[in-house]
Image (spheres, coloured by chain):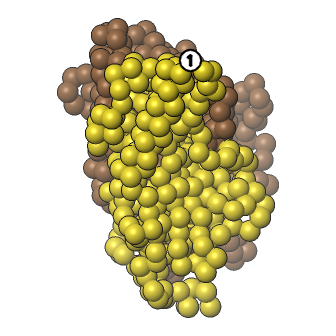
Chain colours: A brown, B yellow
Amino acid sequence: MLATVTDRQRVWRMARMGICALLLTVCRATASALPVEAFPSDLPVVWQAPQPLEVATAPSMPELDIGVVLFDPGVENNDDSPAAVVRRLEASLLARELKAALIESNQFGVVRLVPEASALTPVSIHSEILRSDGRDLIIHVTVRDAMSQVWFHHTISHRETFATGAAIALKEVFHVVSNRLRFRWQQYSSRERAQLVAASEVRYAETLVPDAFSGMLNVSPDGWQLKRLPASDDPMLARITRVRNQEYLFCDAIDEQYEELAERVIPTYALWRRATVEQAAWLERYEQRVMDRDDKDHDSRFARMQAQYAAYRSYRIQEQAMYELAEAFENETQPTTLRTVEQVVRLEGTLAVQYNEWRRLLRDIFILEQGVL
Amino acid sequence: MAGSALSGLTACGRLLLPVYLVTLLGCVSESAPVTSSSRPMSDLTGQWEVDYAKSDSIQTQINARFREVQREMRRRQDAIERGVSYQAQPVGDVDTLIALAKMAELVTESSILDIEQDTRWLRIERENSFALSCQLKGEAEPVLSLLGAEQCWWDGQQWHFLVELPDGLMIEHRFVISEGNEALAQRTVMGMAGTATRLEVVRIFSRSDATFRGYRCTETLSRGRVCTTEAAERG
C-alpha cells in the first residue's frame, strides 16, 4: 500500500522536476510549459481492498427500499471534453454497479436507480466521483433517509492493480457500502424500522399535498418524529400510493434502458480500465528498471522517450475509443413511453428532463383527481 | 543517417562535442503564451493530406544540423591550431538531438488529418495516432493523466497543442491555416526538459476534400450511425 503511494509520488516528482527544469531553461523556449501547479498534490490516499459482501438468506423485515441516485460525475455540465464525457458515462455505469452489489447482498428490498434524490424511497444513496483515471477510483458516498438525515458518509478509494491477473468486478468496490448500510439498518429495532418506512411514505405524500399531510411528521436538523399516520382507508393515501407506483414505473423503465445500453458499453469500459492500468504499471516497471541500473545512459535516450510516448499514445487511443462510445451513450435521448391510467405518455429529452416531466404529470393527474372528488 | 553525418567529425571534434552542449541547437521558435487569445479562431475543418514536396524531411534537417556542427567544430579546431581566440557557438546535445529526431519521425508520421470544429470543439484526428482535441470555451486547462499531461490554446494566429511526458519529453504541435484555407501547416517542436535542444519539423497539408460532404453523422448506441444533412441542421 505504502509502496504504491510512494511510486506515485515518485512519478509525479519526476514529472515536476522535468517541468521545473523545462521552465528554468533559459533558452527561447518553444512554448510555455504546463504550470507546475496544474499537477495534483500528492494526497495521502489509503487504498482499500474490496470487502467480502455480507449476503443474507432473506432481507430483514420490513424491507428497506433503496434509491441509488445516478452518480455525480464531478465535472461541469457544460464540459464536453473527452475526459468529462467519459466521466459522465462512468457515473451511470458505477451507479449500476452499486445497485448490483446491493441486490446481490439480499439484505434489502427493491433497489432502484433514480435520476434525482427524492422521498420516493426511504433511503437514498448519493455518490460523487472525486477521481477516476482508469486505475484509481475515489468516490464519496453519502447515505440519507427520506427525512434528509445522514446515515453515514464513506469514501471509497480503490486502486486497480490486476495483481491477481484479472480485474475485480467493479461492484466489489461497493460491497463496503452494502455492508455498512446493512449494519446501520440492523441497529434499528423492528419498531424503528417500521416507523422509518412509514415516515418516508408520509414524507412522500407531503411533497404531493403538503396541506393534507402537514403535522404528521416533524423533521428538524437533529432528527425526525412521526406524530401520527393517515388512516389506512384514507382515499387520498390510496391515490398517493398509485402516484408512487407510477413513479416507480418510470424508474423501472429507465432502469431497463440503462441496463440495455450499459451491456453494450461495459466491455469497452473494462478494456479501457485494463489498458490504462497495464500501461501505467508497465511504465513504472520500466522506470524502475532504469533507476535500478543506476546508469540512465545505459538505456538510450531514444528508447526511454519512445517507451514513454508509446505508453501515452496507447492510453490516449484507448481513451478515444472510450470517448466515442461515451459520446454515443450521451447521444441516446431515447424517448420513454409509459402508460398511466387512461393515457399513454411519451417523454423525450434527457433523463432528468423526462423524470421531472413525469413527476409534473403525476402531480397534475393527482390534482385533477382531487378536484373530481 | 546520423552516424554518417557524424563520421566526418575528427576524433578531437567528437571528444569536444559534449563540451559544447548548451544552446546552439536551441530553440527554433518563439515562445507562445498559454493564455488563449480573443481574436477570432481560424477554422481548420476538413480532411487534410500531407504534401511531401512542401514538408520538411527529418533526415534532411538532421543532415543540415550536423553539417552545422561539423562546420563549427572545424572553426574551433582551426582557431586552436592557429592559437587565436574564437567566440564559440554552442552546438547542443547531439545524443538528445538524435533521439528527438527519431521521435519526431514517430510523432509526425500521420499523413492524414481529419479535423472537426464547431463553436465548442476542435478535434484533430490523426491517422495511426491519438486525436488532439481542444475545448474552445473558457481557459486553457491542462488535462492530466497517469501517463502525461496535455494542454491546448489559441494564440490569435495558431492553435497550440502541448504534450508533456513524465520523463520530460515535450511535444508541441502548432497548426496554422493559409489565407486561402487551402494549406495547413503543422509545426512540431520536440524538446527535452533540462536541455536546450529543440527540433522543429514542419509538415504542410493540403485539403483532400475538395467539396464538403454536405452531411454530418453522429454515432448512437441503439440506432448506430445517424446522419443528417448540414443544410437541414443549419436551417
Q: Residue furthest front?
A: B82
Residue lying at 42% horizontally and 16% vertically, measured from the top left: A7
Residue A142, how many percent across, how many down?
58, 31
Q: Is residue A51 above or below residue A294?
A: below
Q: Quadrant of residue B194?
A: top right
Judge from the rendering whether residue B51 lies leftward or rightward of residue A241; answer left or right. left
Of residues A110 and B98, the one nearer the viewer is B98
Residue A291, how many percent across, how many down?
36, 13
User: Circle 1 sits on which residue?
Assistant: B83
Judge from the rendering whether residue A261 lies leftward or rightward of residue A243; answer left or right. left
Of residues B189 and A145, the one nearer the viewer is B189
In this figure, what is the number of numbered marks? 1
Classify mark 1: helix, strand or loop.
loop
Q: Is residue A319 visible?
A: no
Of all chains, the one bearing label 1 is B
Of residues A6 and A353, the one nearer the viewer is A6
Residue lying at 34% horizontally and 73% vertically, measured from the top left: B224
Residue lying at 49% horizontally and 57% vertically, measured from the top left: B202
Q: Amino acid at mark 1?
A: Gly
Residue A98, how many percent across, how many down?
41, 38
Pick the quarter of the image with the C terminus of chain B: bottom right
Q: Residue furthest left?
A: A165
Judge from the rendering whether residue A226 lies leftward or rightward of residue A183; answer left or right. right
Q: Quadrant of residue A95?
A: top left
Residue A175, how many percent across, how many down?
38, 27
Q: Is residue B143 visible?
A: yes
